Amino acid sequence: MEKIENSRWKMSMAGFTAFFLATIFYLITGPNIPVILGFFTSAVVLFILNAGYIFYTDKKSGNKKNQI
């Protein structure tokens, strides 16, 4: 659990978790495709921003150990 709490990908995981929970909720209560697509879009945007931030900080610091 400590590995997840200190993960640099925490924001991306939160975005996709919100997407999955919202999808399940809206499929149970009534299919609402625009809302589900909105949550998916927000999860993808959070992932892209988080990946850009991580790669930028790695490049800026010159840290080769944490790069993929």
Image (cartoon, grey):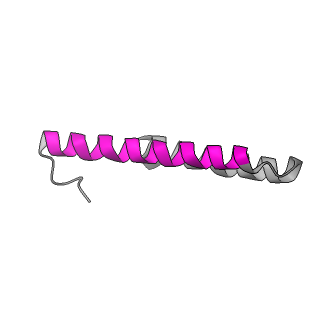
Span colored in magenta: 34-60
- Pinpoint residue 30: horizontal percent, then vertical percent: 87, 49
Taking the spot 69% from the left edge, 48% from the top edge, the residue there is 36
Look at the image and say whether residue 56 sits in the magenta stretch.
yes
Q: Residue extending furthest front?
A: 34
Q: Pinpoint residue 58: horizontal percent, then vertical percent.
A: 20, 45
Task: Give how far across and how far down residue 68 sits, in percent.
Answer: 26, 60
Name the side, left or right, on which 11 lies relative to 28. Answer: left
Left or right, residue 52 beside residue 35: left
Residue 24 appears in view:
yes
In the displayed orientation, state which residue is furthest to the bottom.
68
Q: How many marks are shown on the rendered structure?
A: 0
Residue at the spot 71% in from the left edge and 46% down from the top edge: 34
Residue reaching furthest to the right: 29
Q: Residue 67: within the magenta?
A: no
Q: Is residue 7 visible?
A: no
Q: Residue at x 35, y 47 (%)?
A: 51
Task: Say which residue appears at 66% left-offset and 52% top-offset.
Answer: 20
Front one among 51 and 9: 51
Q: Main secondary structure of the magenta part?
A: helix
